[in-house]
Image (tube, rainbow, N blue to C red):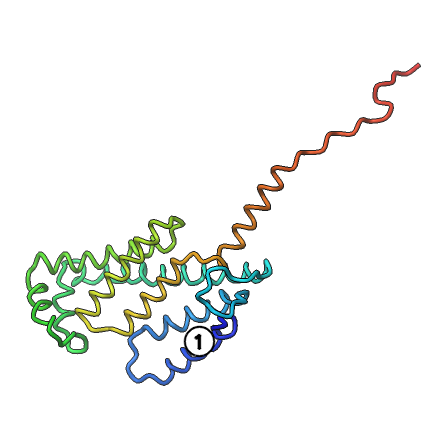
């Protein structure tokens, strides 16, 4: 409720949570950045209930701040995924396709549930381990490109890739809270709500109206047609 006033509270809660957590997994730092930008996004949001489809109007300055905040989220999320893929390339285990074999059997990560035998078997097959490792790199690069894309279809593809990637990570490694934060952040980054796009629509309307106004006819110059005696 009241996104304009609860967004700063949300940001404060993420800061408090990250400073008190004993076993960080990286998701809390992403949540800090995203909620900070959400404060800018919700500056001009005057709705009392955030599920309303038709928000009340906001000033052009507030819409511009919200637009900048949304782009901040998009750039940040795209950077996280693209940088994550590029940082894995110099590592031999990722380039030769054995990374998932060692990740599934790591001492610090691993999901000890009914999926463990399936994950251990899949990562022990060389072809499947190679596809999982290289597929992770390709998914991260594709996800970053889709987030920055202006196409709604590509952004939906990116959201599906994000959910599939992090559900697989939860199944293999067990990073549940990290996966939930990343999926929610990508959902925000690929959204196209009216408060965020209202400024762009208004700019297009103003441009069309200005183009439709006919140019005034030139005024005749007095005495221009008279010759000298």
Query: Residue visible at 32% across and 61% down?
Result: 83
Q: Where is residue 123 in the image (x, y as percent from the top left)?
A: 10, 64
Q: Quadrant of residue 180?
A: bottom left
Q: Nearer the viewer, residue 92 or 117?
A: 117
Would residue 36 appear left or right of 107 to someone viewing this image?
Answer: right
Query: Residue tagged by mark 1?
Result: 10
Furthest residue in direction right, as rendered: 229
Q: In this view, does 170 lie above or below 53?
A: below
Q: Quadrant of residue 93?
A: bottom left
Q: In this view, does 186 lie above or below 112?
A: above
Q: Position of residue 9 (x, y in %)?
A: 47, 78
Q: Where is residue 205 in the image (x, y as percent from the top left)?
A: 57, 46
Would residue 185 appear left or right of 138 to someone viewing this image?
Answer: right
Would residue 192 appear left or right of 89 to someone viewing this image?
Answer: right
Element on which disc 1 rests:
helix
Q: Is residue 19 above or below residue 155?
A: below
Quadrant for the C terminus, please. Answer: top right
Q: How many marks are shown on the rendered structure?
A: 1
Query: Residue visible at 38% across and 58% down?
Result: 190
Query: Residue visible at 34% across and 66% down?
Result: 184
Q: Which of 112 and 131 is in front in this view?
A: 112
Would residue 56 appear left or right of 152 to someone viewing this image?
Answer: right
Q: Position of residue 201 (x, y in %)?
A: 52, 50
Q: Nearer the viewer, residue 11 or 99?
A: 11
Question: Badge 1 local density, few (<14 within 10 Å), some, or many (20+)?
Answer: some
């Amino acid at each position: 409720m009241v996104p304009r006033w609860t967004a700063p509270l949300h940001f404060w809660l993420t800061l408090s949570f990250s400073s008190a957590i004993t076993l960080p997994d990286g998701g809390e730092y992403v949540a800090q950045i995203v909620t900070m930008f959400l404060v800018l996004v919700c500056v001009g949001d005057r709705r009392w209930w955030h599920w309303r489809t038709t928000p009340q109007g906001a000033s052009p300055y507030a819409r511009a701040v919200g637009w900048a905040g949304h782009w901040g989220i998009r750039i940040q999320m795209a950077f996280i995924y693209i940088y994550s893929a590029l940082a894995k390339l110099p590592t031999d285990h990722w380039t030769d396709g054995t990374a998932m074999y060692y990740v599934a059997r790591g001492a610090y990560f691993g999901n000890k549930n009914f999926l463990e035998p399936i994950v251990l078997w899949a990562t022990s097959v060389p072809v499947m381990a190679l596809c999982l490792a290289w597929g992770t790199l390709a998914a991260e690069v594709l996800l970053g490109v889709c987030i920055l894309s202006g196409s709604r279809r590509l952004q939906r593809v990116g959201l599906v890739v994000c959910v599939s990637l992090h559900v697989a990570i939860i199944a293999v490694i067990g990073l549940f809270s990290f996966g939930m934060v990343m999926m929610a952040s990508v959902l925000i980054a690929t959204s196209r709500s009216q408060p965020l796009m209202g400024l762009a629509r208004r700019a297009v309307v103003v441009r069309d109206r200005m183009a439709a106004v006919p140019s005034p006819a030139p005024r005749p110059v007095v005495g221009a047609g008279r010759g000298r005696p």
